[in-house]
Image (cartoon, helix red, strand yellow):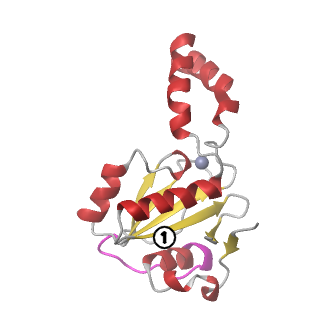
């Protein structure tokens, strides 16, 4: 089933996101909406650390937390801070195609070898490090993961709007994800 909706007009934005910071993010990035001026952040964006992604958004518009796979499980204090002190009421959770946090086990040898050669670790410690953390950072599947992470965040922060999105590195556009 193809869950991805390419946002190419304002009409394709889901009604629940129109006239919200989520809808604005989609308009700025995908639809070239002129950049407005902001004095305070409107949105928290959680996205992967991957270097292939760059968002077109106004200055001051968003807090951005970058973590492998858009996995915010280990950034909860910062999420809480952005809401409680920063005042944001929406979270855009942005996964992306070809994410390195999918099928981590296949990168085990490269990871260990890289730490040994580039960072000066001994092999045994590098192997332990990988085996300890890989299960925490594995996301399984990009779309499935942001859907489950969005569901988790909605339970954790019931008054906050959370939108799962996917960044397509092939054309640098954001897609909405159909839920259910
Ligand atoms: Zn990634």
Seen from this angle, which residue lies furthest bottom?
11
Picture coordinates of residue 135, whole percent (x, y)? 55, 34
Residue ranking furthest to the left: 85
Count of numbered labels shown in the rendering? 1
- Residue at point 49%, 79% (across, down): 24
The x and y percentages for residue 128 are 52, 19
Q: Name the residue: 62% across, 63% down.
A: 166
Residue 53 can be seen, yes or no: no
Residue range corresponding to the magenta coloring:
29-41
Q: Is residue 76 left or right of residue 163?
A: left
Magenta stretch: dominant secondary structure:
loop
The answer to which of 19 and 154 lies nearer the viewer is 154
Quadrant placement of the N terminus: bottom right
Residue 57, relative to residue 23: is it above or below?
above
Q: Quadrant of residue 176?
A: bottom right
Give the residue pinned by disc 1: 57
Q: Residues within 10 Å of mark 1 (few under 14, many from 20)?
A: some
x, y percent for residue 45: 45, 62
Where residue 54 sits in the image (x, y, percent)?
56, 59
Q: Is residue 154 magenta?
A: no
Q: Which picture quadrant has residue 95?
A: bottom right
Mark 1 Cβ and ligand 1 under 8 Å apart: no
Q: Residue at x 57, y 18 (%)?
A: 127
Give the answer, above or below, for where 140 lies relative to 64. Answer: above
* Residue in front for this viewpoint, 7 or 117: 7
Q: Please name the residue shown 63% across and 19% down the image.
A: 113
Helix, strand or loop for disc 1: loop
**Quick check: 77 left or right of 141?**
left
Of residues 110 and 135, the one nearer the viewer is 135
């Amino acid at each position: 089933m193809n869950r991805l909706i390419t946002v190419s007009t304002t009409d394709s934005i889901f009604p629940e996101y129109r006239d919200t910071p989520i809808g604005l993010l989609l308009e700025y990035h995908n639809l070239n909406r002129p950049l407005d001026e902001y004095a305070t952040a409107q949105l928290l964006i959680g996205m992967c650390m991957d270097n292939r992604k760059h968002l077109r958004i106004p200055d001051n518009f968003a807090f951005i937390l970058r973590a492998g796979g858009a996995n915010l499980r280990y950034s909860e204090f910062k999420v809480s801070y952005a809401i409680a002190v920063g005042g944001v009421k929406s979270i855009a959770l942005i996964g992306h195609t070809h994410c390195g946090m999918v099928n981590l086990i296949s990168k085990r040898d490269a990871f260990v070898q890289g730490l040994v050669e580039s960072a000066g670790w001994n092999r045994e410690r590098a192997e332990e490090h990988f085996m300890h953390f890989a299960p925490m950072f594995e996301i399984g599947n990009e779309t499935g993961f942001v859907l489950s992470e969005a569901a988790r965040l909605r339970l954790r922060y019931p008054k906050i709007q959370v939108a799962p999105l996917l960044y397509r590195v092939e054309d640098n556009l954001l897609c909405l994800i159909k839920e259910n």
